[in-house]
Amino acid sequence: MMSLRAVARTAAPRALRAVSASPITLGRATVRATSNVLRTQLPQKAFSTTVFRAAATEIDSELSEKLSTEIGYEQDIASNEPVPATVKDFLENGPFELVDTPGKEDVVLKRTFGNEQITISFSIADLQNYEPGMFDEDPALGDEEGAQNEEDMGEDGGAPVRLNIVIEKPSKGALNIDAVAQDGSIVVDNMFYYHDAKLAHGDSAETQHAAQAVYPGPPFGTLDEDLQVLMERYLEDRGINQALALFVPDYLDMKEQKEYLRWLNNLKGFVDAE
């Protein structure tokens, strides 16, 4: 579910570009014009250093102040939003280990299940690329049905998040499942089998290229219905279930806010550095 901060933020930070664009352009134009007029009166090097530094200092100060305002705004929002129960319960009671590297888009969940190693990865990029009205243009739905589908999602309809699920067995290769977490459900799109488990992770261009040459199997939705049900139960038995589907979008929403705040602080630190 998209939180209040995701909606409220659209006005403040995005306006930053509009506010800063005009002074920057004017400052450069002023420096160039003044330099042309006074070039014959002052040494060019001394003038350009003094005037440009003064203009840059003024602009830098305004930008730094605006960034401070935005940072404070984001900190206030974060301090007033409790950790969702779906996130707290999953982290405290779930079987997965969370791997979340600050500054990175991707999040990874890991666990051992018998002799299997299970890895689930997902990214905040899916939140940033999501458009709530996209269902209205679905050619598979009529206008009325598409609008009703969007309305039924209501406030609980969040962005669909892609899951890359890898289940490995020693010396037996790996299953690679493409799925989507949305509205408390895990929807499987495709299932791949690789003799070499490295192909399931695609850590290099070479392995990605090799994986593309492997027969992908039919789309999951075209399989026999009983087979689909059994495969879904197979995944649920390994913790790929409703709890995971609820956790993923809520956790990504929290991470996106943290990464945005970290980005603002990094930007301000760079602007303020001498």
Image (cartoon, rainbow, N blue to C red):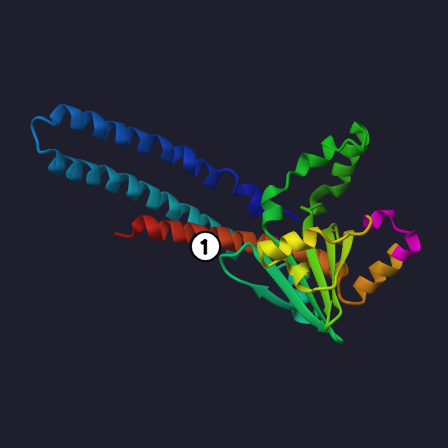
Left or right of residue 12: residue 219? right
Left or right of residue 150: residue 72? left
Residue 266 in the magenta stretch? The answer is no
Helix, strand or loop for the magenta stretch, by majority: helix
Residue 92 seen in this snapshot: yes
Residue 221 in the magenta stretch? The answer is yes
Left or right of residue 189: residue 37? left
**Residue, x 80% and y 63% (percent of image)?**
236
Q: Nearer the viewer, residue 169 or 131?
A: 169
The location of residue 93, given as percent across then percent down, is 69, 70
Q: Amino acid at mark 1?
A: Arg
The location of residue 208, given as percent across then percent down, is 63, 54
The location of residue 178, given as percent across then percent down, is 73, 53
**Residue, x 79% and y 35% (percent of image)?**
148
Instruction: Say if 255 sits above or below 172 in the image.
Output: above
Residue 3 seen in this snapshot: no
The location of residue 67, given as percent across then percent down, is 39, 46
Q: Nearer the viewer, residue 180 or 261?
A: 180
Q: Nearer the viewer, residue 224 or 138?
A: 224
* Highlighted magenta segment, given as a residue range: 219-227
**Residue, x 61% and y 66% (percent of image)?**
98
Q: Which residue is mark 1?
A: 262
Left or right of residue 215: residue 61? left
Query: Quadrant location of residue 144?
Result: top right
Outermost residue, bottom side: 114
Local crowd size for mark 1, using a 10 Å CA cut-off: few (<14), some (14–19), many (≥20): some
Outermost residue, left side: 41
**Residue, x 12% and y 33% (percent of image)?**
44
